[in-house]
Image (cartoon, rainbow, N blue to C red):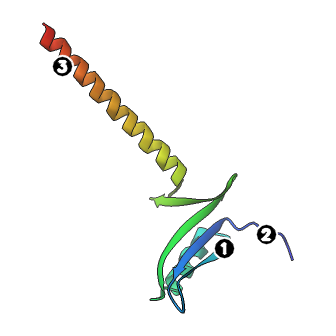
């Protein structure tokens, strides 16, 4: 048997016959999504998609045609929050400057 690299992983939350988490591995995102559509079941009440990165499997989201790892989304959120904080500090500074005049 070959040592195959699966690029995508799907974790399923299954409720029947008992609550458990099952994992399935796929070579492409297309086959992962096809499998999800074919196996849509009442017993599957949640799932998470992962992609293979240099550090292992990481959750991701799809925006248009782009696959974006959650770590990149977290970095973007932190940059936005930092920018907002800097804007608030600058606005307070301008407000204080106008009061002093």
The percent coordinates of residue 47 (x first, y second) are 51, 73
Tell which circle, 3 or 2, labels the residue nearer the N-terminal end: 2
Q: Are marks 3 and 2 in contact (CB under 8 Å)?
A: no
SS label for mark 2? loop
Of residues 55 and 96, the one drawn nearer to the viewer in this rendering? 96
Point out which mark residue 25 bears.
Answer: 1
Q: Are marks 1 and 3 in contact (CB under 8 Å)?
A: no
Of residues 35 and 76, the one drawn nearer to the viewer in this rendering? 76
How dense is the environment of label 3, judged by Cα within 10 Å: few (below 14), some, or many (20 and up)?
Answer: few
Return the residue at label 2: 4
State whether residue 39 is above or below residue 23: below
State whether residue 97 is above or below residue 82: above
Point out which mark residue 95 bears.
Answer: 3
The percent coordinates of residue 88 (x first, y second) are 27, 29
> Could you tell me which residue is drawn at 66 percent across and 73 percent down?
25
Point out which mark residue 62 bears.
Answer: none
The percent coordinates of residue 100 (x first, y second) are 15, 9
Q: Quadrant of the C terminus?
A: top left
Q: CA distance from mark 1 to mark 3?
A: 56 Å
> Could you tell me which residue is drawn at 61 percent across and 62 percent down?
51
> Could you tell me which residue is drawn at 15 percent across and 13 percent down?
98
The percent coordinates of residue 46 (x first, y second) are 47, 76
Of residues 72 and 43, the one drawn nearer to the viewer in this rendering? 43
Q: CA distance from mark 1 to mark 2?
A: 11 Å
Q: Quadrant of the N terminus?
A: bottom right
SS label for mark 3? helix
Q: CA distance from mark 3 to mark 2?
A: 61 Å
């Amino acid at each position: 048997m070959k040592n195959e690299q699966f690029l995508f992983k799907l974790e399923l939350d299954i409720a029947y016959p008992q609550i458990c988490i099952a994992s399935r591995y796929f070579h492409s995102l297309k086959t992962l999504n096809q499998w999800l559509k074919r196996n849509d079941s009442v017993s599957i009440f949640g799932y998470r998609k992962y992609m293979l990165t240099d550090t292992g499997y990481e959750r991701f989201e799809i925006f248009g045609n782009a696959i974006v790892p959650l770590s990149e989304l977290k970095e973007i959120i932190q940059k936005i929050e930092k920018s907002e904080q800097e804007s608030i500090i600058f606005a307070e500074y301008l407000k204080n400057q106008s009061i002093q005049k």
